[in-house]
Amino acid sequence: MKPPDAGTPLVRYPWVVVRLRCHVCPRNADVRLAALAARYGHRVPVRSVLHGFMGGCPWNPHTELRKPQKYGHRCGAYLPDVGSGRPPDLPPTMSGLTLIEGGKADMLPAEPAPARRRVGGEDE
Ligand SMILES: [Zn+2]
C-alpha cells in the first residue's frame, strides 16, 4: 500500500484517525476520518485539513490579521502519519483481541468473596 501524502484525498486516506501535530504550539488533534469527510467533503486532500488546523494556531501563516514577519514564528503544523506506512494507534476496539499467555487453565475457580468485616465497629 502506498503511504498517503499531503495530497491524498480523504476518501483514500487509509486510516481511521487523522493525527495533527504542531512543532511550535502545544495544539494537537486526533480527528476521525469520517468526521473530517463530513465537514470538508471526502474529496479534499488531507492538506486542507492541515490548513484548517493551522487556522486555530497563534502562528498561523495564512491569517490576514498578522502581517508576514520575516523572522517570525510560523505554525509548524504537520501530519505525522503522512509519508509513513505505519498506521497511527488504532482505537482499542479496532485493534482486536490480544492473546494472553496462560488462559483458562490458569484461572482460579470462583471463590466466595471474603467475609466482610466492619471496620471500627466493635460495638455491636
Ligand atoms: Zn501551530
Image (cartoon, rainbow, N blue to C red):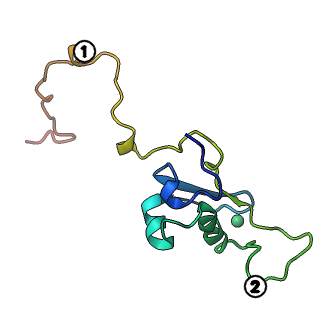
For label 2, count other residues whose C-alpha is less than 10 Å away and answer few (under 14), some (14-19) or many (20+). Answer: few
Q: Residue furthest right?
A: 70
Q: Amino acid at mark 1?
A: Asp
Q: Which residue is mark 2?
A: 64
Q: Secondary structure at mark 1?
A: helix
Q: Which residue is mark 1?
A: 106
The quarter in which the N terminus is drawn is top right
Q: CA distance from mark 1 to mark 2?
A: 65 Å
Q: Is residue 71 left or right of residue 82?
A: right
Residue 11, horizontal then vertical, whole percent? 48, 59
Query: Which residue appears at 53% of the width and 56% of the height?
Result: 18
Q: Amino acid at mark 2?
A: Glu
81 vs 115: above or below: below
Residue 113, horizontal then vertical, whole percent? 13, 30
Query: Which residue appears at 21% of the width and 41% of the height?
Result: 120
Query: Which residue appears at 21% of the width and 40% of the height?
Result: 119
Residue 23 position by quadrant: bottom right
Residue 112, horizontal then vertical, whole percent? 10, 26
Residue 98 position by quadrant: top left
Residue 62, horizontal then vertical, whole percent? 74, 76
Which of pointers 1 and 2 indicates the residue nearer the eye? 2
